[in-house]
C-alpha cells in the first residue's frame, strides 16, 4: 500500500482561471487597493495588441499606470534593478505582469528591489550566507500569463541571469508569490506554434521532474500526474491547430505543473537546461524539453516505479511493457507523441556548443540546486555525456 509522505503545502496566490476571465482584473485592482500600477511586459506583446484590453480594464478601474515594456528573454540582475528604479520613480504601488516566464521573473525581482535596499543580486540563493533577508512586504503582483508553460504565476521563484558570468540563479521566497494569477487561455491564442511547443515542453519538465525529484510530495504528485497526462493529450493539437480547448488544457496543465515544481523542485533537465539557456540563448523550453529524454535514460532504473505510475495514469496497456523498461517506453512516447509532432528539434542547429562552452555549462550545472535533488547521483562526467547528446544531434 502507498504511504503518504511528510509534506508542507502553501499557495498564497488566488488563482482565477477561465476563458475571457481577464475582466476580473478590474475588481482585483480594487481589492488590492492599488493607486498606480506598473505594467511589466515586452514590446512583442504590445505589438501583438495583447495589452490593449488590459490597459482599458485598468483605466476603467480608475487606476493610473506606467507601462514598462523593456523585458527581454532571460532577465539579468541589471535589467531588474533598472526596472525597479523606474518603479520607484513612478511611485507605483502594484505590479501587473503580462507575459511569459521572463516577465514574471522580472516582476518578482522588481517587487523586492523596489521595496528594499541594494540590488536583486543581494537576494539570490547563490549568495549563501551573504544573501540579504527580505524584511519588508514586496509590492503586490497580479500575474497574467500569455504563455502556457512557465508556471511562474503560481511559484515563489524569480530566475535571473548574472550578465557577467552567464550563471542563472534564483530568488526564492514565499513573499514573492503573486497575490493573484489570472489565467485566461484566450491570451495564448496568438502564441506562435514554436513558442507553444517550447513552453509546453517546459510544462512536461516541471511535472515529470517534480514527480521524480527526491523531495517529491504526496499531495503535489496528483498535480504532476494530471499535468503530464494533459500535455500528452493536448500539446500537439495546441501547437498544430491552435485549438482553444487544447490551449485551455495546456494553460491548466501549466498551473498544475507550476504548483508541483514550486514545492518539489526539478531535476537534471533544469540543472543542465538553465546553463544551456544562459550560455547559448537557447529557449528554456527547448533545452528542458529535449533534456527529458537523456534524463529518463540516465535516471530510468532509479525511478522505475514512478515511471510505471506515470504510464498507468495515462491508461497505457501495461501488459505490453517488460519490467525494467518503463522508462524506455516513456522515452518513445515523448519522441513520437511530442518531440516529432510538435517539430521541437527544428532550429536546434542554430545553437553552437563548442568544448569551451560545454566546460562552462558543466560547471554551472554541477552547482545547480536541481542536480542535488535528482534521484540518481550526477557527476561532472555524467553532465558532459548528456550535453554531448546535443552536440551529436547538431552534426
Ligand atoms: Fe522550466
Image: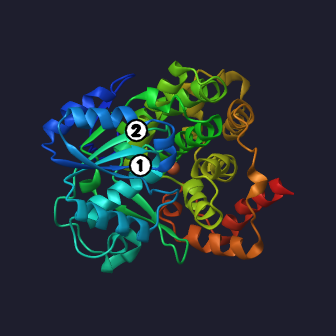
Q: Is label 1 in a helix, a strand or a loop?
A: loop
Farthest right residue in view: 395
Residue 374 lies, in percent from the top left, at 53, 56
Number of marks present in the image shown = 2
238 left or right, relative to 70: right
Return the residue at label 1.
41
Q: Which mark is residue 51?
A: 2
Q: Earlier in the sequence, mark 1 or mark 2?
A: 1
Q: Nearer the viewer, residue 187 or 16?
A: 187
Q: Residue at x 14, y 37 (%)?
A: 31
Task: Say if mark 1 contacts mark 2, CB within 8 Å.
Answer: yes
User: Could you tell me if residue 211 is visible in this image?
Assistant: no
323 left or right, relative to 150: right
Residue 90 lies, in percent from the top left, at 24, 60
115 left or right, relative to 250: left
Q: Residue at x 79, y 60 (%)?
A: 391
* 324 w.r.t. 133: above or below: above
* 29 w.r.t. 269: above or below: above
Q: Residue at x 75, y 48 (%)?
A: 347
Q: Quadrant of residue 312?
A: top right
User: Could you tell me if residue 374 is visible in this image?
Assistant: yes
Residue 189 lies, in percent from the top left, at 52, 28
Q: Is label 2 in a helix, a strand or a loop?
A: helix
Query: In the picture, which quadrant includes the C terminus?
Result: bottom right
Amino acid at each position: 500500500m502507498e504511504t503518504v509522505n511528510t509534506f508542507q503545502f502553501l499557495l498564497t496566490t488566488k488563482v482565477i482561471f477561465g476563458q475571457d476571465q481577464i475582466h476580473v482584473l478590474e475588481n482585483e485592482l480594487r481589492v488590492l487597493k492599488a493607486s498606480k500600477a506598473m505594467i511589466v511586459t515586452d514590446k512583442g506583446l504590445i505589438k501583438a495588441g495583447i495589452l490593449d484590453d488590459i490597459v482599458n480594464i485598468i483605466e476603467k478601474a480608475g487606476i493610473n499606470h506606467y507601462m514598462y515594456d523593456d523585458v527581454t528573454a532571460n532577465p539579468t540582475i541589471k535589467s531588474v534593478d533598472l526596472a525597479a528604479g523606474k518603479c520607484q520613480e513612478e511611485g507605483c504601488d502594484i505590479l501587473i505582469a503580462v507575459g511569459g516566464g521572463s516577465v514574471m521573473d522580472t516582476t518578482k525581482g522588481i517587487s523586492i528591489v523596489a521595496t528594499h535596499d541594494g540590488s536583486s543580486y543581494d537576494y539570490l540563493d547563490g549568495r549563501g550566507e551573504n544573501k540579504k533577508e527580505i524584511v519588508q512586504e514586496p509590492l503586490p503582483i497580479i500575474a497574467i500569463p500569455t504563455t502556457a508553460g512557465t508556471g511562474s504565476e503560481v511559484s515563489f521563484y524569480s530566475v535571473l541571469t548574472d550578465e557577467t558570468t552567464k550563471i542563472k540563479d534564483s530568488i526564492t521566497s514565499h513573499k514573492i508569490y503573486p497575490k493573484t494569477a489570472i489565467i485566461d487561455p484566450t491570451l495564448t491564442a496568438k502564441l506562435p506554434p514554436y513558442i507553444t511547443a517550447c513552453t509546453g515542453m517546459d510544462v512536461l519538465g516541471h511535472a515529470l521532474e517534480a514527480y521524480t525529484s527526491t523531495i517529491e510530495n504526496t499531495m503535489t504528485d496528483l498535480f504532476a500526474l494530471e499535468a503530464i497526462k494533459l500535455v500528452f493529450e493536448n500539446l500537439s493539437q495546441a501547437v498544430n491547430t491552435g485549438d482553444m480547448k487544447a490551449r485551455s488544457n495546456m494553460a491548466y496543465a501549466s498551473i498544475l505543473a507550476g504548483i508541483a515544481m514550486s514545492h518539489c523542485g526539478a531535476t537534471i533537465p533544469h540543472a543542465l537546461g538553465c546553463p544551456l539557456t544562459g550560455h547559448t540563448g537557447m529557449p528554456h523550453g527547448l533545452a528542458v524539453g529535449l533534456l527529458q529524454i537523456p534524463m529518463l535514460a540516465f535516471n530510468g532504473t532509479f525511478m522505475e516505479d514512478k515511471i510505471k505510475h506515470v504510464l498507468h495514469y495515462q491508461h497505457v496497456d501495461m501488459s505490453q511493457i517488460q519490467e525494467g523498461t518503463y522508462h524506455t517506453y516513456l522515452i518513445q512516447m515523448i519522441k513520437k507523441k511530442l518531440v516529432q509532432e510538435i517539430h521541437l528539434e527544428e532550429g536546434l542547429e542554430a545553437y553552437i556548443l563548442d568544448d569551451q562552452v560545454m566546460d562552462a555549462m558543466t560547471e554551472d550545472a554541477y552547482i545547480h540546486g536541481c542536480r542535488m535533488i535528482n534521484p540518481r547521483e550526477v557527476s561532472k562526467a555524467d553532465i558532459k555525456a548528456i550535453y554531448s547528446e546535443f552536440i551529436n544531434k547538431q552534426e
